[in-house]
Image (cartoon, rainbow, N blue to C red):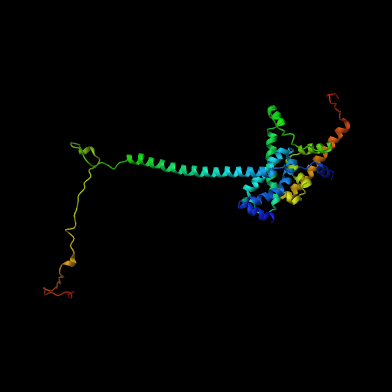
Amino acid sequence: MDEQELLCRIQEGDEAAFAKIVKKYKDRIVNYLYQLTGDYQRAVDLSQETFMRVYFKAKKYRPIAPFSSWLYTIASNLAKTEIRKVQKFSVISLDDLNNNYKSGAFAKNPSDSSLLAKQVRKALNSLHPRYKIPIILKDMEGFSLEEIAQVLKSPVGTIKARVSRGRNYLKKEMEKVLQDKESYPVKEETSDGRT
Amino acid sequence: MEELNLLEELERVKAPPGFEQRLEAQLQERKEKRRLMIRSLRYSFAGGIAFLLIFFTILNVIVFQKKKPADFTFQKGEILDAREYIPITEVVNYSSEIQNMASEPQVIYILEEVSDDIREGIKY
Protein backbone atom coordinates (compact mmCIF):
# COMPACT_ATOMS: atom_id res chain seq x y z
CA MET A 1 0.00 0.00 0.00
CA ASP A 2 1.51 3.34 -1.01
CA GLU A 3 1.59 6.49 1.07
CA GLN A 4 -1.30 8.16 -0.74
CA GLU A 5 -3.57 5.27 0.11
CA LEU A 6 -2.36 5.32 3.70
CA LEU A 7 -3.12 9.02 3.85
CA CYS A 8 -6.62 8.43 2.48
CA ARG A 9 -7.16 5.89 5.21
CA ILE A 10 -5.81 8.26 7.87
CA GLN A 11 -8.26 10.86 6.59
CA GLU A 12 -11.02 8.40 7.44
CA GLY A 13 -9.55 7.97 10.92
CA ASP A 14 -7.71 4.67 10.40
CA GLU A 15 -5.18 4.39 13.20
CA ALA A 16 -3.49 1.31 11.72
CA ALA A 17 -2.55 3.29 8.62
CA PHE A 18 -1.27 6.05 10.86
CA ALA A 19 0.88 3.54 12.77
CA LYS A 20 2.42 2.40 9.48
CA ILE A 21 3.35 5.96 8.56
CA VAL A 22 4.83 6.54 12.00
CA LYS A 23 6.85 3.34 11.81
CA LYS A 24 8.25 4.31 8.43
CA TYR A 25 9.21 7.89 9.22
CA LYS A 26 9.82 8.12 12.96
CA ASP A 27 13.61 7.67 12.83
CA ARG A 28 14.07 10.06 9.93
CA ILE A 29 11.95 12.76 11.54
CA VAL A 30 13.57 12.40 14.95
CA ASN A 31 17.01 12.61 13.36
CA TYR A 32 16.04 15.60 11.21
CA LEU A 33 14.65 17.49 14.18
CA TYR A 34 17.65 16.54 16.28
CA GLN A 35 20.00 18.01 13.67
CA LEU A 36 17.88 21.15 13.60
CA THR A 37 17.41 21.73 17.32
CA GLY A 38 20.52 20.01 18.69
CA ASP A 39 18.47 18.64 21.59
CA TYR A 40 17.40 15.02 21.48
CA GLN A 41 14.54 15.26 23.99
CA ARG A 42 13.13 18.28 22.23
CA ALA A 43 13.50 16.53 18.89
CA VAL A 44 11.48 13.57 20.19
CA ASP A 45 8.75 15.87 21.52
CA LEU A 46 8.61 17.78 18.25
CA SER A 47 8.44 14.52 16.30
CA GLN A 48 5.46 13.44 18.38
CA GLU A 49 3.79 16.76 17.64
CA THR A 50 4.63 16.39 13.95
CA PHE A 51 2.89 13.02 13.75
CA MET A 52 -0.05 14.36 15.76
CA ARG A 53 -0.49 17.07 13.18
CA VAL A 54 -0.26 14.56 10.38
CA TYR A 55 -3.16 12.65 11.95
CA PHE A 56 -5.37 15.64 12.72
CA LYS A 57 -4.57 17.66 9.59
CA ALA A 58 -4.60 14.71 7.17
CA LYS A 59 -7.75 16.11 5.54
CA LYS A 60 -5.80 19.20 4.50
CA TYR A 61 -3.22 17.17 2.61
CA ARG A 62 -3.42 17.53 -1.18
CA PRO A 63 -1.48 14.97 -3.25
CA ILE A 64 0.23 17.64 -5.37
CA ALA A 65 3.54 16.87 -3.63
CA PRO A 66 4.95 13.68 -2.13
CA PHE A 67 3.84 12.87 1.39
CA SER A 68 7.42 13.13 2.68
CA SER A 69 7.58 16.77 1.56
CA TRP A 70 4.41 17.55 3.49
CA LEU A 71 5.72 15.72 6.55
CA TYR A 72 9.04 17.56 6.46
CA THR A 73 7.21 20.87 5.98
CA ILE A 74 5.29 20.28 9.21
CA ALA A 75 8.46 19.23 11.03
CA SER A 76 10.41 22.23 9.69
CA ASN A 77 7.72 24.70 10.72
CA LEU A 78 7.57 23.22 14.21
CA ALA A 79 11.34 23.31 14.49
CA LYS A 80 11.49 26.92 13.30
CA THR A 81 8.92 27.95 15.91
CA GLU A 82 10.79 26.03 18.59
CA ILE A 83 14.17 27.55 17.68
CA ARG A 84 12.62 31.02 17.78
CA LYS A 85 11.09 30.25 21.17
CA VAL A 86 14.38 28.94 22.54
CA GLN A 87 16.25 32.01 21.26
CA LYS A 88 13.66 34.24 22.94
CA PHE A 89 13.65 32.48 26.30
CA SER A 90 17.14 31.10 26.63
CA VAL A 91 17.31 31.82 30.36
CA ILE A 92 16.96 28.69 32.50
CA SER A 93 16.55 28.80 36.25
CA LEU A 94 19.13 26.94 38.31
CA ASP A 95 16.36 24.89 39.96
CA ASP A 96 15.09 23.62 36.61
CA LEU A 97 18.62 22.88 35.53
CA ASN A 98 19.24 20.92 38.70
CA ASN A 99 15.92 19.02 38.42
CA ASN A 100 16.53 18.14 34.80
CA TYR A 101 20.01 16.97 35.62
CA LYS A 102 18.76 14.80 38.47
CA SER A 103 15.89 13.36 36.41
CA GLY A 104 18.37 12.38 33.74
CA ALA A 105 16.91 14.54 30.99
CA PHE A 106 20.37 15.61 29.90
CA ALA A 107 21.79 12.15 30.12
CA LYS A 108 19.60 11.06 27.17
CA ASN A 109 21.13 13.64 24.83
CA PRO A 110 23.52 11.74 22.60
CA SER A 111 26.90 13.38 22.19
CA ASP A 112 28.90 13.51 19.00
CA SER A 113 31.71 11.02 19.16
CA SER A 114 34.64 13.03 17.77
CA LEU A 115 35.84 16.52 18.56
CA LEU A 116 35.51 17.41 14.89
CA ALA A 117 31.87 16.39 14.92
CA LYS A 118 31.32 18.54 17.99
CA GLN A 119 32.83 21.52 16.21
CA VAL A 120 30.67 20.87 13.16
CA ARG A 121 27.64 20.67 15.40
CA LYS A 122 28.56 23.95 17.04
CA ALA A 123 29.03 25.64 13.68
CA LEU A 124 25.76 24.17 12.41
CA ASN A 125 23.86 25.37 15.47
CA SER A 126 25.17 28.87 14.95
CA LEU A 127 23.59 28.94 11.47
CA HIS A 128 20.28 30.73 10.97
CA PRO A 129 17.40 28.28 10.31
CA ARG A 130 17.03 29.90 6.89
CA TYR A 131 20.34 28.24 5.90
CA LYS A 132 20.42 25.38 8.36
CA ILE A 133 17.21 23.72 7.15
CA PRO A 134 18.14 23.57 3.44
CA ILE A 135 21.65 22.31 4.29
CA ILE A 136 20.38 19.53 6.54
CA LEU A 137 17.72 18.52 4.04
CA LYS A 138 20.22 18.51 1.20
CA ASP A 139 23.34 17.08 2.80
CA MET A 140 21.93 14.85 5.52
CA GLU A 141 18.47 13.83 4.38
CA GLY A 142 19.39 13.56 0.72
CA PHE A 143 16.61 15.75 -0.68
CA SER A 144 16.95 17.31 -4.11
CA LEU A 145 16.75 21.10 -4.52
CA GLU A 146 13.27 20.75 -6.04
CA GLU A 147 12.08 18.71 -3.08
CA ILE A 148 13.52 21.23 -0.62
CA ALA A 149 11.77 23.98 -2.55
CA GLN A 150 8.51 22.07 -2.09
CA VAL A 151 9.15 21.57 1.61
CA LEU A 152 10.04 25.18 2.29
CA LYS A 153 7.61 26.60 -0.29
CA SER A 154 10.33 28.74 -1.88
CA PRO A 155 11.68 28.97 -5.43
CA VAL A 156 14.45 26.52 -6.39
CA GLY A 157 16.85 29.42 -7.05
CA THR A 158 16.39 30.73 -3.53
CA ILE A 159 17.06 27.29 -2.07
CA LYS A 160 20.16 26.88 -4.20
CA ALA A 161 21.49 30.23 -2.98
CA ARG A 162 20.71 29.39 0.64
CA VAL A 163 22.47 26.03 0.43
CA SER A 164 25.51 27.67 -1.13
CA ARG A 165 25.63 30.52 1.40
CA GLY A 166 25.07 28.13 4.28
CA ARG A 167 27.91 25.91 3.14
CA ASN A 168 30.23 28.88 2.77
CA TYR A 169 29.33 30.08 6.24
CA LEU A 170 29.91 26.61 7.65
CA LYS A 171 33.24 26.40 5.88
CA LYS A 172 34.35 29.76 7.30
CA GLU A 173 33.26 28.74 10.78
CA MET A 174 35.22 25.50 10.56
CA GLU A 175 38.30 27.27 9.26
CA LYS A 176 38.06 29.71 12.14
CA VAL A 177 37.82 26.88 14.64
CA LEU A 178 40.78 25.08 13.12
CA GLN A 179 42.90 28.26 13.09
CA ASP A 180 42.03 28.92 16.75
CA LYS A 181 43.13 25.43 17.62
CA GLU A 182 46.42 25.82 15.85
CA SER A 183 47.22 29.16 17.50
CA TYR A 184 45.95 28.22 20.99
CA PRO A 185 46.76 24.63 21.85
CA VAL A 186 44.18 23.04 24.11
CA LYS A 187 45.31 22.95 27.72
CA GLU A 188 44.68 19.58 29.22
CA GLU A 189 43.08 19.65 32.62
CA THR A 190 44.09 17.22 35.31
CA SER A 191 41.59 15.47 37.53
CA ASP A 192 42.30 17.86 40.45
CA GLY A 193 41.53 20.89 38.27
CA ARG A 194 45.12 21.99 37.54
CA THR A 195 46.19 22.71 33.98
CA MET B 1 32.38 19.52 -0.88
CA GLU B 2 34.26 18.99 2.37
CA GLU B 3 31.32 20.36 4.39
CA LEU B 4 29.16 17.63 3.07
CA ASN B 5 31.50 14.99 4.42
CA LEU B 6 31.72 16.82 7.71
CA LEU B 7 27.94 16.87 8.04
CA GLU B 8 27.83 13.18 7.34
CA GLU B 9 30.12 12.67 10.29
CA LEU B 10 27.50 14.08 12.65
CA GLU B 11 25.86 11.45 14.75
CA ARG B 12 22.51 10.26 13.47
CA VAL B 13 19.88 9.45 16.05
CA LYS B 14 16.84 7.19 16.09
CA ALA B 15 13.48 7.41 17.78
CA PRO B 16 13.64 6.15 21.38
CA PRO B 17 12.02 2.82 22.27
CA GLY B 18 8.36 3.24 23.15
CA PHE B 19 8.01 6.19 20.80
CA GLU B 20 4.98 4.69 19.07
CA GLN B 21 3.28 3.70 22.33
CA ARG B 22 3.77 7.18 23.71
CA LEU B 23 2.42 8.66 20.50
CA GLU B 24 -0.58 6.34 20.61
CA ALA B 25 -1.35 7.38 24.20
CA GLN B 26 -0.96 11.02 23.28
CA LEU B 27 -3.22 10.54 20.28
CA GLN B 28 -6.00 9.02 22.38
CA GLU B 29 -5.64 11.82 24.91
CA ARG B 30 -5.80 14.48 22.20
CA LYS B 31 -8.80 12.80 20.58
CA GLU B 32 -10.65 12.75 23.91
CA LYS B 33 -9.79 16.38 24.48
CA ARG B 34 -11.09 17.32 21.04
CA ARG B 35 -14.28 15.36 21.57
CA LEU B 36 -14.88 17.10 24.88
CA MET B 37 -14.14 20.45 23.31
CA ILE B 38 -16.58 19.83 20.45
CA ARG B 39 -19.23 18.69 22.91
CA SER B 40 -18.73 21.68 25.18
CA LEU B 41 -18.83 24.01 22.15
CA ARG B 42 -22.06 22.42 21.00
CA TYR B 43 -23.64 22.77 24.44
CA SER B 44 -22.44 26.32 24.89
CA PHE B 45 -23.80 27.23 21.46
CA ALA B 46 -27.18 25.69 22.26
CA GLY B 47 -27.11 27.37 25.68
CA GLY B 48 -26.32 30.69 24.08
CA ILE B 49 -29.21 30.40 21.66
CA ALA B 50 -31.57 29.36 24.47
CA PHE B 51 -30.41 32.27 26.59
CA LEU B 52 -31.04 34.71 23.75
CA LEU B 53 -34.51 33.31 23.19
CA ILE B 54 -35.37 33.62 26.87
CA PHE B 55 -33.89 37.10 26.98
CA PHE B 56 -35.96 38.33 24.04
CA THR B 57 -39.09 36.70 25.39
CA ILE B 58 -38.65 38.47 28.72
CA LEU B 59 -37.82 41.72 26.92
CA ASN B 60 -40.97 41.33 24.85
CA VAL B 61 -43.08 40.81 27.95
CA ILE B 62 -41.54 43.78 29.79
CA VAL B 63 -41.31 46.34 26.97
CA PHE B 64 -44.31 45.62 24.78
CA GLN B 65 -46.76 44.88 27.55
CA LYS B 66 -46.32 48.43 28.85
CA LYS B 67 -47.73 49.89 25.63
CA LYS B 68 -51.42 49.21 26.25
CA PRO B 69 -54.10 50.28 23.69
CA ALA B 70 -55.64 53.75 24.20
CA ASP B 71 -58.31 53.84 26.88
CA PHE B 72 -61.57 55.22 25.41
CA THR B 73 -63.70 54.91 28.49
CA PHE B 74 -64.50 57.98 30.50
CA GLN B 75 -64.64 58.32 34.19
CA LYS B 76 -67.67 59.92 35.71
CA GLY B 77 -67.37 63.73 35.66
CA GLU B 78 -64.32 63.75 33.41
CA ILE B 79 -63.99 66.84 31.25
CA LEU B 80 -64.24 65.95 27.58
CA ASP B 81 -62.12 68.90 26.43
CA ALA B 82 -59.12 67.44 28.16
CA ARG B 83 -59.14 64.63 25.63
CA GLU B 84 -57.44 64.98 22.31
CA TYR B 85 -60.34 63.44 20.44
CA ILE B 86 -63.62 61.71 21.08
CA PRO B 87 -64.04 58.41 19.38
CA ILE B 88 -67.56 57.86 18.02
CA THR B 89 -68.58 54.38 17.22
CA GLU B 90 -71.89 53.83 15.40
CA VAL B 91 -73.29 50.52 14.52
CA VAL B 92 -74.85 50.54 11.03
CA ASN B 93 -77.01 47.67 9.85
CA TYR B 94 -77.46 47.57 6.11
CA SER B 95 -79.22 44.26 6.01
CA SER B 96 -82.68 45.86 5.74
CA GLU B 97 -81.58 47.92 2.74
CA ILE B 98 -80.30 45.12 0.67
CA GLN B 99 -82.92 42.99 -0.92
CA ASN B 100 -82.60 39.95 -2.97
CA MET B 101 -84.15 40.75 -6.35
CA ALA B 102 -84.27 37.17 -7.43
CA SER B 103 -86.96 36.36 -4.90
CA GLU B 104 -89.38 39.03 -6.32
CA PRO B 105 -91.55 38.35 -9.41
CA GLN B 106 -90.16 39.74 -12.66
CA VAL B 107 -91.79 42.91 -13.92
CA ILE B 108 -91.90 43.86 -17.58
CA TYR B 109 -92.27 47.52 -18.32
CA ILE B 110 -93.71 48.52 -21.75
CA LEU B 111 -92.86 52.02 -22.76
CA GLU B 112 -95.47 53.54 -24.96
CA GLU B 113 -95.34 56.78 -26.89
CA VAL B 114 -97.93 59.22 -25.59
CA SER B 115 -96.84 62.36 -27.38
CA ASP B 116 -98.03 63.11 -30.93
CA ASP B 117 -94.83 64.85 -31.79
CA ILE B 118 -92.52 62.15 -32.99
CA ARG B 119 -88.99 63.37 -33.26
CA GLU B 120 -87.11 60.19 -32.91
CA GLY B 121 -87.91 56.58 -33.28
CA ILE B 122 -89.10 54.72 -30.26
CA LYS B 123 -86.43 52.57 -28.69
CA TYR B 124 -87.30 49.62 -26.56
Q: Is residue A153 visible?
A: no
Q: Position of residue A119 (x, y in %)?
A: 81, 36
**Where's residue B46, x and y in %?**
47, 44
- Front position in the image: A72 or A4: A4
Q: Give the residue drawn at x 66%, y 44%.
A: B23
Q: Give the number of marks.
A: 0
Of the pair A49 and A130, the residue shown nearer to us: A49
Q: Give me the residue at 63% from left, 43% from top.
A: B25
Q: Quadrant of the C terminus of chain A?
A: top right
Left or right? Give the position of A177 relative to A80. Answer: right
Residue A46 in view? yes
Determine which quarter of the picture holds residue B105. bottom left
Which quadrant, please, contains the N terminus of chain A?
bottom right
Q: Nearer the viewer, residue B76 or A195?
A: A195
- Image point (19%, 67%), residue name: B102
Q: Quadrant of residue A124?
A: top right
In the image, residue A189 above or below residue A17 = above
B51 sits to left or right of A44: left
Residue A118, position as x, y percentages in the image: 81, 37
Residue B1, image quadrant = top right
Q: Is residue A97 above or below residue A167?
A: above
Residue A36 in picture, x, y percent from top left: 74, 41
